[in-house]
């Protein structure tokens, strides 16, 4: 059995948030829903940044890299939600992201995905203190994203 299935129930139901995110306006409904229901005892949120951004020269190849990563993360879908953004310019850009995982810290099933080690991860100890930045990442736009967003992908 997966140890994440053995965790005590959480008032934050990840699937319910995913439905809100998919079916409502992100800035006015889904993001406030996230902050209203988020459970720091049952979930951990991270920023991530690709370690080899200097290699990102062709946007379509960078997008394919993210697609492959998400395919290899498929078995974690029940326990994870993520936003990956390609920011910068067409021929010089970065991959940055925000992820929510079930449990404390990064789950073993996520660490086992080979792509995970290609990113620097920073745990967000207090999501409320990072409300504006998290909201901007969920929306793929806003003043806390350091470069223009070229495109994004959502793991849900």
Image (cartoon, rainbow, N blue to C red):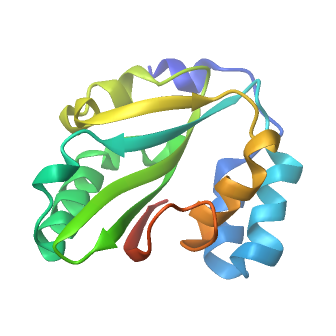
Q: Which residue sits at x=43%, y=41%?
A: 48
**Location of residue 34 in the rendering, given as x and y in whole percent from the top left corner:** 77, 55
Q: Nearer the viewer, residue 75 or 48?
A: 48
Q: Nearer the viewer, residue 16 or 68?
A: 68
**Is residue 106 shown above or below 51?**
above
**Location of residue 33 in the rendering, given as x and y in whole percent from the top left corner:** 82, 60
Q: Nearer the viewer, residue 57 or 38?
A: 57
Q: Which residue sits at x=30%, y=58%?
A: 94
Give the side of residue 114 with respect to residue 49, left or right: left
When asked about the image quadrant of residue 123, the answer is top right
**Location of residue 59 in the rendering, given as x and y in whole percent from the top left corner:** 18, 74
When asked about the image quadrant of residue 115, the answer is top left
Q: Quadrant of the N terminus?
A: top left
Q: Which residue sits at x=82%, y=77%?
A: 28
Q: Nearer the viewer, residue 93 or 65?
A: 93
**Location of residue 13 in the rendering, given as x and y in whole percent from the top left corner:** 73, 47
> Which residue appears farthest toward the right when viewing the image?
36
Give the side of residue 118 with respect to residue 38, left or right: left
Q: Which residue sits at x=11%, y=72%?
A: 58
């Amino acid at each position: 059995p997966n140890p994440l299935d053995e965790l005590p129930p959480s008032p934050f139901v990840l699937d319910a948030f995913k439905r809100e995110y998919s079916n409502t306006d992100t800035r006015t409904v889904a993001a406030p829903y996230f902050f209203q229901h988020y459970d720091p005892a049952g979930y951990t949120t991270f920023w991530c940044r690709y370690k080899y951004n200097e290699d990102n020269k062709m946007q379509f190849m960078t997008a394919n890299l993210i697609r492959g990563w998400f395919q290899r993360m498929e078995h974690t879908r029940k326990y994870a939600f993520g936003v990956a953004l390609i920011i910068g310019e067409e021929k010089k850009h970065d991959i940055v992201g925000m992820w929510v995982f079930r449990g404390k810290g990064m789950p073993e099933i996520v660490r086992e995905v080979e792509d995970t080690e290609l990113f620097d991860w920073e745990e967000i100890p207090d999501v409320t203190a990072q409300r504006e930045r998290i909201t901007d990442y969920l929306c793929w736009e806003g003043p806390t994203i350091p470069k223009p967003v070229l495109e994004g992908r959502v793991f849900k």
